[in-house]
Image (cartoon, rainbow, N blue to C red):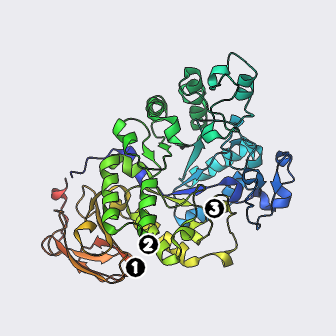
Amino acid sequence: MKTPPLDAFTRHAASQVIYQIFPERFAIGGNLSSSEKLADPAYSLPRAVKRGWDEPPLNESCGDQFYGGDLDGIVSKLDYLTDLGVTGVYLTPIFTSPSNHKYDATDFFSIDPMFGGEEALKRLTDALHAREMTLTLDAVLNHCSDQHPWFLAAQSGDPAKRDWFTFKPDGSYLCWQDFGLMPELDLSNPAVRDVLYRKPDSLVQHWLAKGIDSWRFDVAQDVGIAVAQEMRSIVGARFPAATLLGELNGFSGSWFQAGEGFQGMMNYWYRTATLAWLAGDIDAVQMNHAVRDARAGYGLRGLLCSWNMLSSHDTPRLITSVGDAERARLALLMQFTLPGVPLVYYGEEIGMEGGADPDCRRTMRWNEAEWNHAQRDWVKRLIAIRQTNPALQYGDITVLGDRLAGNALVFLRHTTVPGEEALVIVNMDDKPLNALLMLPYSHWYDGVPLRDALGTSPDTKVQAASVRLNIAPHTGAVYQAAEPHQHYTFFKPRNRM
């Protein structure tokens, strides 16, 4: 498979490490306690359930429980994120809404007062940009709240808004997965598309003009490929640096094969395969093929711009899913070395636990005595390794693990520059992986020394297009080439492709 030349946009997008925050649960600005913050009139809602920061979420009234997290709280923790090594922040919705998750907006053009309003967004955006970090917001184009003025007008028979939604003769209406509180917008209506993304003052363009960097679009399967293509054409012409990324809980190949739509997708395909392999539900043959299928189906650019996620506000947390810290470390190793942008859900780096929603939306633990420091050190190390090796940021991939007996994922990442490579091995077997691996790659030359960036596996070297592997059970390695000679280089510029 020939590596296509990459444009600057793809190389930049693929070099990011994104940190996902559920704003209501991350931090409270101004050194306020939950009780002090929740005294704000913004929380004077009929069904509001006010919780202390250290209390776990209740299973009932999930969307009505409030802890007081806000945007200024995020600003106060940016040094923490900088130390971790992330390059950008993704926030779940922050627009005015009666819920804690804000996926049911009542106003797409105002920042919820619970989070500090537009002034707080500007403080956050400015603080991120001062650190050369990016901000991605979450857009819900498919639906809104049943209390949104657009829907209330449509329900009352306003002819200007009635066809923005789809009503049945009995007065019922299409709504997201039959949740009546979330009526679906009719995206076939040009007027709806105008206000959402087509016009210069539309939702998508308005906030890009205000300084945010990129968008993640909720429920991409409901938004649709044609809308994504039109949006990319219109928004991309005005904001060429903005990434438009879709959420699809599955295999996203068709979205990329259609062309000129979302530049990336949330890579649930990787997550499903990773967790299934670590649980023993699939074998290494399927795991290696899953990685190869993503490369073939997404294309290199689509794969590199997609977010590699192991958990989110919609799923159980990583350590809860895999059952122990050892498997979590291997999952994280895969997340940071496979093609794509690592997406770290807040708290994963300190080993927070949590089952399905709402348990996965516990408040962030800021007491360091509660941290899994070994996991945080592991995440920091993986970020540092990734960010110093171009192959792990935007290199192509050659999958090799299904050539070997045993239970290992093996792949080579490589750019078009000889010397920019990484050979990644994850051995899930109960015995060592001791094998000679044939290496169908022309630019790791005979005699090139290879050293494990993780420091756990023995040094090896290339021997006539082969590599001797000796990887302990339930461990991994990230082999990178070394230049051992003072007066000779293996990687001459004239061999660049």
Residue 330's mark? 2
Is there a contact, CB below 8 Å, between mark 2 and mark 1? Answer: yes
Q: Position of residue 19 (x, y in %)?
A: 55, 58
Image point 77% across, 51% down: which residue?
Answer: 64
Amino acid, disc 3: Cys
Image point 27% across, 46% down: which residue?
Answer: 5
Circle nearer the N terminus (1, 3): 3
Circle nearer the N terminus (2, 1): 2
Kindly indicate the quadrant of the structure image that contains residue 56. bottom right
Q: Position of residue 181 (x, y in %)?
A: 71, 39
Image position of 143 (left or right of 487): right
Residue named by callout 1 = 474
Image position of 268 (left or right of 317): left
Is 111 drawn above or below residue 289 in the view shown? above
Amino acid, disc 2: Leu
Is 78 drawn above or below residue 234 in the view shown? below
Tell me the CA gap for discs 1 and 3: 27 Å
Image point 34% across, 83% down: which residue?
Answer: 472
Q: 10 Å neighbourhood of mark 2: few (<14), some, or many (≥20)?
A: some
Q: Pick the residue in front: 447 or 331.
A: 331
Is any part of residue 360 visible from this angle?
A: yes
Residue named by callout 3 = 360
Is 29 drawn above or below residue 210 in the view shown? below
Q: Secondary structure at mark 1?
A: loop
